[in-house]
Amino acid sequence: MLPPSMTRSSSSMGRGQMVGFGLVAAAVTFSMLWYVFKLGNLGLSIDSDDKELLLDEEDDQDNDEKNVTNSKEVKLSLDKPGIVNDAPTTSFKPNIETVTVKPVASTKDEEVKQEESKEDPKKTKQEEVHKLVEDADKRGKVLFKAKNYLEAATCFSEAIDLIDAHHISSVEEGGSSNTLARQFVTLMNNRSAMYEKGGLPDLALSDCDAILEKDVGHCKARTRKLRILEAEKRYTEALTEVCALQLKFMQDNRDKIRMGIPCKPPVSQEKIEELVTLILPKEVEETVKRNKTLHRELPSVYTILQLLQSFSGFNAWMAKAAKDENVSSLTTKLDALEDGDTGKAELLFRRGRRYMYEQRFEDASKDFEGAYDITEKNESIKDDFEEYPRLLEWVGMGRHLRYDLDRALECYEKCSDLEPTNTEILVKRAGVKMDDGKTDDANELFETALGLEPNAVDALLHRSNLRMIKQNLEGAKADLERCIELRPDFILARLRLTTILMATQDLDGAKKALDGAEAIKPDSSDVHSYRGEMLFSSGEFADAKKEFERAIECDATNPTPYVNAALSVMNIPTSFGPPDVKEAVKLLSKAIEVDPMFHAAYVHLGQLQLSMATNLNDAREVTHLYDKGIKQCRTAEELKDICSMRILTVAQVDAAASLKMDTLNMQ
């Protein structure tokens, strides 16, 4: 994360954590995402069980009994060649030799008998195939019960080959057998089970895929595929199979789920979370590496101002910049200088500082870097450059804002060498260490700063953030209370304290701290946003929304109240029933517009758009939204939420495609 004041995790809503937005969105549409959060805890575990094959055997027996019954009902109905009958084969063959043909018999009757006689060879061949298949199947099941799995697989393969050969022959002759087609899938499933138990997972997976090509809803084949993929640590593919099982379940039980009738899903929510957790670390690691190669834009104006105002030196440099010449005048002087002129570095520094004053941060960063390049090429300039330490500080700040941590630390350390007792520089170095995950080093720097100046407000404020990260809330609270004692008008310290008191359920204390902040700055966007969060946490959604709207009025560049207002909207029913989804989408989109790095907005907007997607192309667009947000993330911590949602979204879309579904929406 960036220096402590730039973290987004300072409160319970849009600042970092999700507050059941996926659950709320479910009130609008009935999607896979809703199912994952809403029904998942009822699921079953995926375990291998010998009973699986026995169940397939029972299914076959049931089918055979039904077929026998049907054959008895239709008697000698020869237009149903797929029916299996236990009666002697002669019952299907009219014995022409014993039939007395009367002279008055019609020509039509004779033609029927001749046609029946012609069909007999096909029927006989089919019955022979049935017998051979049944024999191989029975041998396979005997071997299975003896735990001779691979030998059993060989028997099932024999039966499958017989059906395959018969199918080819039947197609060539213009016929088919539905019964054999059903047996084919059952035998493939049984063979797949034998391969799995016999330690041949690749062959088992191949059979599962063949079954699912013929029957996308075959639960046993998909469950086995999931189990094997998970055993082989192919977690991304396994998650897709989990989602396919869930989607099929939702499709089959949509009416019951709508009516609130309890349904036991095929896979537990814990299994989904487990797979996402297993996939996530590698995904985050690879994304962090990719992001390091990207050109980093500066954060939003609001975020930069939050950082600058968190340091006590803010007013001093702002005053100097205000008294200096304006940008136009400084530019004129710069244009008059030659490239090698030693005064150019100082003028670039002054213009950069003026740009900072005018909140033209990109221009300021360019000028600071230009001045730094000049000093690096000409060492002699540093001795006569009075503001050189401040130049190092500003260059370090700009690089830190772009998350160029190593080069930022290089500048800060050079500045510390020149000004070893400057506690503000020590605090900024600690911020870089925190963002680099070196919290112990950061804490040591804070201790050094406070050792030099026990009442260093900057060190106390930013160390409180480190302590919050480490879940040392009492320590963070003590630092903030000391900040306020030393500097009662420090509104940021009061807001941070409000966060901690809310987290520890001290709502009276949180309200008091927030009232103190509001007394200092009534028109603070953050004050109204925090108050809205307090109202939201107590279920007062309409009043919370009003506070968020007031926060937006106070500062339209603050992304937090847009996200929080969207969450409120999704919890407020309209006069016609469901929440105003379009308004929520508009607010979330606006949050991203004002701050493209505000990752919480991507998470919430993606969830909502996925639940609204009417086709798979729309659902795929959600992954593009997450990709956009991922590129803006600066830390592994920020990446976790978006990457988790992207992983699940991709799995859902791929699962729906494998089921030949057109949408994730079950309405």
Image (spheres, grey):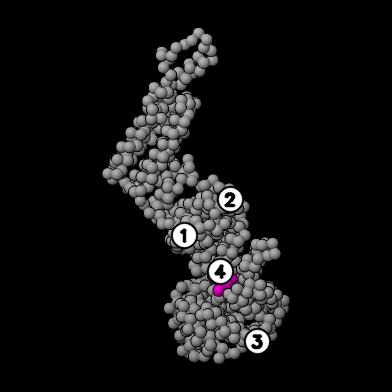
In the rendered image, residue 179, in percent from the top left (x then y), is placed at 44, 34
Q: Which residue is mark 2?
A: 663
Residue ID at (35%, 48%): 51
Residue 260: assigned label: none
- Report crowding for label 3: few under 14, some 14 to 19, many 20 or more residues within 10 A (C-alpha): few
In the rendered image, residue 518, in percent from the top left (x then y), is placed at 64, 84
Q: Quadrant of residue 47?
A: bottom left
Magenta stretch: helix, strand or loop mostly? loop
Cβ–Cβ under 8 Å for marks 3 and 4: no
Q: Which residue is mark 4?
A: 19
| For residue 500, above or below residue 107 | below
Identify the amino acid type marked 4.
Val
Identify the amino acid type marked 1.
Leu
Q: Which dot, 3 or 1, sits closer to the camera?
A: 1
Identify the amino acid type marked 2.
Thr
| For residue 185, above or below residue 335 | above
Q: Which residue is mark 3?
A: 519
Mark 1 or mark 3, which is nearer the start of the sequence? Answer: 1
Mark 2 or mark 4, which is nearer the start of the sequence? Answer: 4
Cβ–Cβ under 8 Å for marks 2 and 1: no
Residue ID at (71%, 79%): 326
Q: Give the camera-side residue of 470 and 593.
A: 470
Q: Which residue is mark 1?
A: 42
CA–CA distance in space, label 2 to label 1? 24 Å
Q: Which residues are magenta?
A: 12-19
